[in-house]
Amino acid sequence: MKKEQLIAKLKPIIEPYVQDEEAFKNLSEDTDFVKDLQINSANLVDIILDIEDEFDIRLENEDMEQMLDVKSAMNIVTSKFKN
Amino acid sequence: MKNRVVITGMGVVAPNGVGIAQFTEALKNGASGISFHPQLKELNFSCQIGGTPTITDELQSNYFTQLQLRGFNSSGILYGCIAGIDAWKDAGFDMNPESQLDYDSGLIFGTGTSGVEKFREAIYKLDDGDVRRLGSTVVLQTMSSGISAYLSGMLGLGNQVTTNSSACTTGTEAVLMGYDRIAHGKAKRMLVGSCSDHGPYVWGGFDAMRVMTYKHNDEPEKGSRPMSARASGFVPGSGAGAMVLESLESATKRGATIYAEVLGGEINSGGQRQGGTLTAPNPEAVQRCITNALKNSSMSPDEIDAINGHLTATSKDTLEIENWTKALGRSGEDFPFINSTKSLIGHCLAAAGSIECIASVIQINEQFIAPSINCEDFHDDIKELISISKVPTQSLNYNVDVVAKASFGFGDVNACVLFKRFIP
């Protein structure tokens, strides 16, 4: 999957949890979930479950710890596909 | 010198009316909120009727954000937030996520148990070994203090924020706890109330105890029969009630509308002694609770115009009336008016006290005694104690100055509060 495609798939998953709409409009690989999008850190686990459902993958605790921004989310999803 | 405490805001989510205007109409008309619940029949309940407030998705979205509603499945928190926010706005405050934190306003909002359906969802996942997939929403919706956590965040309250729990006494106890806090100068305003989930997972245990009626499944509105010769158990209900208590000084300074004054009251327990058990009250403790409530409010028994009873439609109704007659030293024609809001909405369990306190204050504010329905066949033993004329079955215009409201709960716990028409 291309980067753009992946971001396009991640955006609607992240959207319901976003507290800063402006930052969401400008979402890029460097966007941080908590710092930029003002997502409540408790909701990060919900985003991870939604990603699991969308991509039919399973994310481990170690993956979750790293998944703090769009780039790391993309990397982890991509690595799961390779495996 | 204690601060005087007044009520400056009210909100209610009851089976026969959501919002103060609807609920007031229902009280005046003696409108029942009890209906047949097919789900209870499917689950082989003996009692297949109950009281559940009607909340549309549209109404819900006026109180909760889409994010808050994701994975939301706690009817008690839903009802409690609606009642609490309504009361807060009614008192002249707003709900604004950017509002300044208010250290002078707190919240005591009780419940019996929280989010039982959410808990059920979680248990199914857990038992499948899927704890990792519970998501973030289970704890906040199933912890008892979920309701106070939700509400305090929505309103930005910075004084004491807590949840009390004392079975069916909960709502009335919350009012008295909030009253104490303001009377003693620890807060200027307290949002007080209680809420209860609806549905089989809350009501099932009571059905199994055979304390709910199974004789009126084909005539739901006739099912809740406090003080009736044919009373055969309570009808389960659900919902929430909330009021903003405020020091008279603060209310006057703000120019707030004052619905009534809270004179005070008493909370005690019968300790499961002298006839008291886990499920039955110790009569001496009940009488003492009422007597002390009067004393703490500097009221004499003959000043009580009306009683909003606990009166659930079990065999204990007669004992309750007897306790009132003894505690007040008034009986027969000399007894105050008395009604049971449960005749209209069933027994809303942890929410009962707060909804019924709201009903009490509405009767003061609008100067009427609400009908107690389904007691046209007045119980013979109760007739021996008080005159049937003291239990209106039609709405009665009356100059109501003082109402005593009592609630009693499993665990042999009691609470009695006195409300008075506000006179500066």
Image: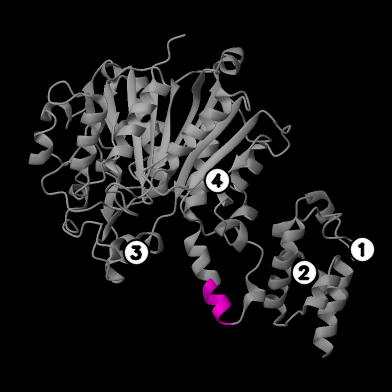
Q: How many marks?
A: 4
Find the distance from the CA under tag 2 to the CA under tag 4.
39 Å
| Magenta-colored segment: predominant secondary structure | helix
Find the distance from the CA under tag 2 to the CA under tag 3.
43 Å
Q: Position of residue B279 (x, y in %)?
A: 31, 53
Q: Which residue is mark 4?
A: B163
Query: In this picture, which residue range is highlighted in magenta?
Result: B123-128
Amino acid type of the residue tagged 2 in the rendering: Leu
Residue that sits furthest to the right in the current view: A30
Q: Which mark is residue B204?
A: 3
**Mark 3 and mark 4 on one chain:** yes
The chain carrying label 1 is: A
Amino acid type of the residue tagged 4 in the rendering: Thr
In the image, residue B361 above or below residue B43: above
Determine if residue B6 is in view. Answer: yes
Amino acid type of the residue tagged 3 in the rendering: Gly
Q: Nearer the viewer, mark 1 or mark 3?
A: 3
**Mark 4 and mark 1 on one chain:** no
Neighbor class of circle 3 (other Cα within 10 Å; few <14, some 14-19, many 20+) is: some
* Magenta stretch contains residue A14: no
**Mark 1 and mark 3 on one chain:** no
Q: Position of residue B118 (x, y in %)?
A: 52, 64
Q: Which residue is mark 1?
A: A30
Find the distance from the CA under tag 3 to the CA under tag 4.
24 Å
Tell me whether the residue at label 2 lies in contact with that at label 4, contact meaning CB atoms closer than 8 angstroms: no
Find the distance from the CA under tag 1 to the CA under tag 2.
14 Å
Neighbor class of circle 2 (other Cα within 10 Å; few <14, some 14-19, many 20+) is: some
B160 or B30: nearer the viewer: B160
Q: Quadrant of the N terminus of chain B?
A: top right
Determine if residue B59 is in view. Answer: no
Q: Which residue is mark 2?
A: A10
Amino acid type of the residue tagged 1 in the rendering: Asp
